[in-house]
Image: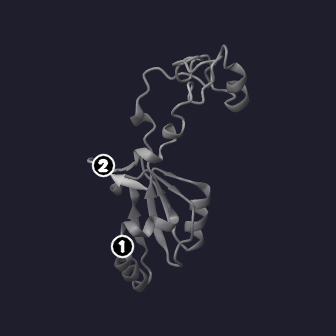
Amino acid sequence: RRQKNRSGGSKMTTRLKRNRHKRGHVSAGHGRVGKHRKHPSGRGNAGGQHHHRILFDKYHPGYFGKVGMRHFHKQKNHYHCPIINLDKIWTLLGEEARLQAAKASGKAAVIDVTKYGIFKVLGKGDLPKQPVVVRAKFVSKLAEKKIKEVGGAVQLIA
């Protein structure tokens, strides 16, 4: 049985708490010899390399130490390369533009992904069977293959 407390959460009624059952028993279930002390083995993760080493090695191997190389003065913009997959590439222009491009025979729609802040085109998914010219800074092998299969072309731009 639970009551609502002032903060809105539920609070267990006092008479149902385990502590009521332990009244009259001196050590309240914590033993006379060992006694219930505050933090007998240290607080938190204390002793991971000392008295708790077996636990850390067993359940958290590799917790201590370093891995990899350090990169001093790393600037994120050197690695900035947003991607898009082929299954999403037509969403940049929209469905109506795709249908119009399908009607206009002999002309392929041009999708310049850099205008949308995207640098690289990857090859996940399928393209509709209509030619398309894709302009990008980087294109994966699979993406290029799929674009050419539907009669399209890839233009790399700086």
Report the mark closest to the observer, 1 or 2: 2
Quadrant assignment for the N terminus: bottom left
Task: Compare marks 1 and 2 and give the one earlier in the sequence.
Answer: 2
Q: Nearer the viewer, residue 124 or 22?
A: 22
In this rendering, position of residue 56 left or right of residue 69 = right
What is the quadrant of residue 56 in the picture? Answer: top right
Tell me the residue at 36%/73% (across/down): 94
Q: Nearer the viewer, residue 52 or 74?
A: 52
Q: How many marks?
A: 2
The vertical placement of 125 against 135, above or below, is below
Q: Nearer the viewer, residue 102 or 31?
A: 31
In this rendering, position of residue 3 left or right of residue 15 = left
Which residue type carries mark 2?
Asn
The image's mark for residue 94 is 1
Q: Position of residue 147 (x, y in %)?
A: 55, 67
Tell me the residue at 29%/52% (across/down): 8
View extreme (top): residue: 50
Q: Which residue is mark 2?
A: 5
Q: Position of residue 122 (x, y in %)?
A: 54, 57
Q: Secondary structure at mark 1?
A: loop
View extreme (front): residue: 24
Q: Secondary structure at mark 2?
A: loop
User: Do callouts 1 and 2 mark residues in contact (Cβ within 8 Å)?
Assistant: no
Tell me the residue at 61%/21% (across/down): 66
